[in-house]
């Protein structure tokens, strides 16, 4: 019993460390982008996506190392559904937010592609190395397209965050990454112990609890943005983070496995992964903004998903 309590304590500590270290890691990435004059659209796709998705990437990578890939799969899929429903819903509930057509047409298209190839790949109950590699390649194509588009529009570096000095930025980057690695390893090990002691399937534990825990920093950022009249930031960040989560956070770690099985609860989540985004698209297309009514619908979608996962 003491082992269970200690594991739960370590799980909570790992969530806290992940969320704090992610903030410093993002600041360090900001220095790199400013140093090399990376265009604004790429800053959004790299800093926002890589930074906010660092907890998910670390969890996915260490779950593969620990031979428990279901934890990584569940975390990524659960986080993607959480972001596009509950995270966006909270932002829209706090304040009505407009959605940029350019962002939806550009980033939304690639996220839809990411979701479709994920659903198709998992339809046979397994993910092969070649499928995982193809996901990573799609993300590389996405970045290449962003670079081309930025050059075409002659964009320059821009960012709303406070950029530290080069020396301090290097410390933030390395230190943040180090603590993310440590916290991710601690999270995976704690999750394995808790599920074994309590008899909870790893898929359910990761789809719900770990997915929400690793998305807390995104949620706080979205709430802050919505309160300051920047609700659209939450929408673009959710789409960008989800694209990176699925294509890179899953694609890269699973590329090191010959084959990865997809258990029932994760398979059940596939219709929700696709359906939640299609519902989001439908709501956005009606007026190009999200209000409290739309937020209520997204709340209901996520609530029904959790109910099905826990009851089936």
Image: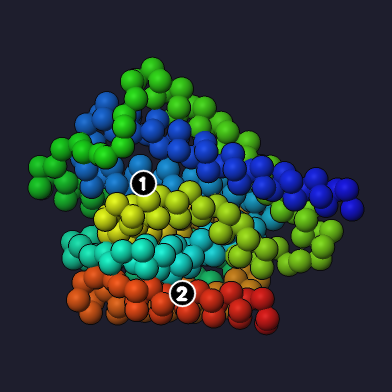
The earlier-in-sequence mark between 2 and 1 is 1
- Give the crowd class for mark 2: few <14, some 14-19, many >=20 residues within 10 Å: many
Q: Residue at left 41%, top 79%?
A: 297
Q: Position of residue 205 (x, y in %)?
A: 67, 63
Tell which of 253 and 5 is nearer to you: 5
Q: Is residue 246 left or right of residue 181?
A: left
Image coloring type: rainbow
Determine which of the numbered discs, if any, sits on residue 263 in the image.
none
Q: Position of residue 32 (x, y in %)?
A: 33, 29
Quadrant hosting residue 10: top right
Residue that label 1 marks: 48
User: Secondary structure beneath disc 2?
Assistant: helix
Determine which of the numbered discs, if any, sits on residue 299 in the image.
2
Q: Position of residue 111 (x, y in %)?
A: 35, 64
Q: Residue at left 22%, top 31%?
A: 37
- Give the crowd class for mark 1: few <14, some 14-19, many >=20 residues within 10 Å: many
Q: Residue at left 31%, top 48%?
A: 45
| Badge nearest the viewer, 2 or 1 | 2
Q: Position of residue 262 (x, y in %)?
A: 62, 69
Tell which of 185 and 232 is nearer to you: 232
């Amino acid at each position: 019993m003491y082992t269970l309590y200690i594991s739960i304590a370590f799980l909570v500590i790992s969530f806290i460390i992940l969320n704090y270290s992610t903030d410093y890691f993002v600041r360090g990435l900001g220095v790199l982008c400013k140093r090399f004059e990376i265009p604004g659209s790429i800053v959004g796709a790299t800093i926002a996506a890589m930074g906010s998705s660092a907890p998910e990437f670390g969890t996915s990578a260490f779950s593969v190392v620990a031979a428990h890939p279901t934890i990584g799969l569940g975390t990524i899929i659960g986080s993607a559904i959480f972001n596009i429903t509950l995270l966006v819903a909270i932002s829209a509930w706090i304040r009505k937010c407009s959605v940029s057509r350019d962002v939806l047409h550009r980033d939304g298209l690639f996220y839809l592609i990411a979701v479709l190839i994920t659903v198709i790949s998992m339809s046979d109950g397994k993910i092969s190395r070649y499928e995982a590699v193809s996901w990573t390649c799609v993300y590389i194509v996405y970045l290449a397209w962003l670079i081309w588009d930025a050059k075409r529009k002659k964009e320059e570096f821009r960012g709303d965050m406070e950029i530290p000095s080069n020396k301090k930025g290097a410390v933030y980057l390395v230190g943040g990454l180090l603590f993310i690695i440590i916290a991710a390893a601690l999270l995976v090990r704690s999750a394995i112990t808790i599920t074994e002691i309590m008899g909870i399937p790893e898929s359910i534990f990761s789809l719900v609890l770990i997915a929400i825990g690793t998305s807390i920093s995104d949620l706080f950022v979205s709430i802050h943005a919505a309160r300051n009249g920047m609700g659209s930031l939450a929408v673009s960040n959710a789409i960008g983070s989800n694209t990176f989560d699925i294509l890179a956070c899953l694609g890269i770690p699973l590329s090191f496995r010959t084959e990865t099985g997809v258990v029932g609860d994760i398979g059940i989540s596939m219709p929700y992964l696709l359906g939640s985004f299609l519902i989001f698209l439908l709501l956005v297309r009606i007026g190009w903004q999200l209000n409290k009514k739309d937020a209520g619908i997204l709340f209901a979608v996520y609530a029904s998903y959790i109910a099905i996962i826990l009851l089936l």
